[in-house]
Image (tube, rainbow, N blue to C red):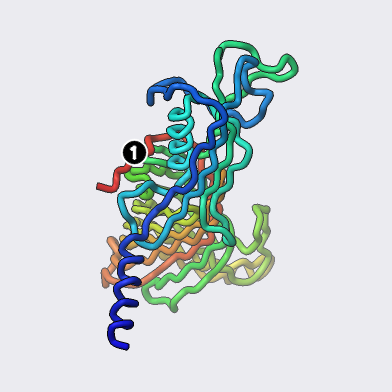
Amino acid sequence: MPITKYVLISLITLLLSSCGSVMRGGVTKQKEYLPLEQDAQFAIYNEPQQIPIEYEIIGKVDLYCYEFTKKTNTTKCDSVSVFHTAEIEAKKAGGNALLLKKYREPTILKSYYELHANVIKVFDFSSPPDLFYAKKKPRIFETYGKGTWDLRLTMPYINHFRLKPDGERDISSAGFLGAAIGFDYYHKNNQYLSVIAGGVIDFFLPFPAPVDYFEGEKEFCSSSFIGLTNNHRYKFLSFGYGLSYSHNSWRHRYFYRGDKSDDIPPDREYTDNTLGLMFTSYWLSKKSFGLGVIYRPNFYRLNASPSFKYEHLISIDFAWRIRLKTGSNKDSSK
């Protein structure tokens, strides 16, 4: 029995140590051509009508990429690696183009990448495609890589304030609306730096609208900020951490009309400039949209005493990314 136990432990250890990203599949040849050089011209087509008239189908490529628990030096599982592997396999068979039949990325139910395509030998790239269709630029599947720059436009839509004005009760307020702009730079294939600046308020309506306050008391909270975070991306999720500077404001105002207007107490107001941390978490779509949460705890006040006080702002954020530059997919983890 002890021997069986040790054998079982050894097999499990060996299995875990061998885990990594694995690419399976390859090319099925229908006709032999000499292999192409790695720097030879290569094209990817999504529709048959895009292919030049002078071509021949010489095989097919079927690839599956599985990513396991432990990172190794094997091929990465991302869209760049899958398409790069398909190109290498096609060139080995003598093909200089692919016609995509099926491409899918991981989902909740399936965790692997999958690509199926015909391997094509184009004899003259300058020959026209079908007369009824114009040649289209091949679709780009990759979304990020080292050296990539994105412009980010965000709307912190739902905001919760926790402020502690001097001489006042602690303020807890929630509301809507905000706007911010920033830039993302990928310094690694799966990590990017973000700098972002913006402002948020606790407006009581979920949409901008003119409001006329007649009578009573009303509190208003707002915050403008700038933040710098380092973010880790894994497929369609990202998590970030960094530093922030905030200018927070709280106002308590009185609204009366008619005879009561002479008895209006003076408004009360509080502002502070604070340093703190910034944490972000986003779900990123395959295209440009993202949905996330921003948490900004503030600890150190620059213009008040005592200097150390905890305040925070939590926002549910809608984000849109605009690609400015697509970087390289070379491994930059070292």
Residue 194 visible here: no
Amino acid type at mark 1:
Lys
Direction from residue 274 to residue 251 in the image, left or right: right
Question: Secondary structure under badge 1?
Answer: loop
234, above or below 221, in the image: above
Tell me the crowding category of disc 1: few under 14, some 14 to 19, or many 20 or more residues within 10 angstroms, Cα based: few
28, above or below 9, in the image: above
Residue 287 visible here: yes
Along the line of sight, the residue nearer the viewer: 180 or 219: 180
Q: Quadrant of residue 99?
A: top right
Direction from residue 203 to residue 36 in the image, left or right: left
Q: Quadrant of residue 40?
A: top left
Q: Position of residue 283 (x, y in %)?
A: 52, 56
Q: Which residue is mark 1?
A: 330
Q: Which residue of the protein is positioned furthest toward the bottom in this rendering?
A: 1
* Residue displayed at 41% across by 67% down: 312
Along the line of sight, the residue nearer the viewer: 62 or 4: 4
Along the line of sight, the residue nearer the viewer: 74 or 288: 74
Q: Position of residue 120 (x, y in %)?
A: 56, 26
* Residue displayed at 45% across by 34% down: 89
Along the line of sight, the residue nearer the viewer: 275 or 16: 16
Q: Position of residue 105 (x, y in %)?
A: 55, 49
Direction from residue 148 to residue 305 in the image, left or right: left
**Numbered marks: total:** 1
41, above or below 143, in the image: above
Quadrant assignment for the N terminus: bottom left
* Residue displayed at 37% across by 73% down: 166
Q: Position of residue 56 (x, y in %)?
A: 60, 21
Q: Which residue of the protein is positioned furthest toward the left in this rendering?
A: 334
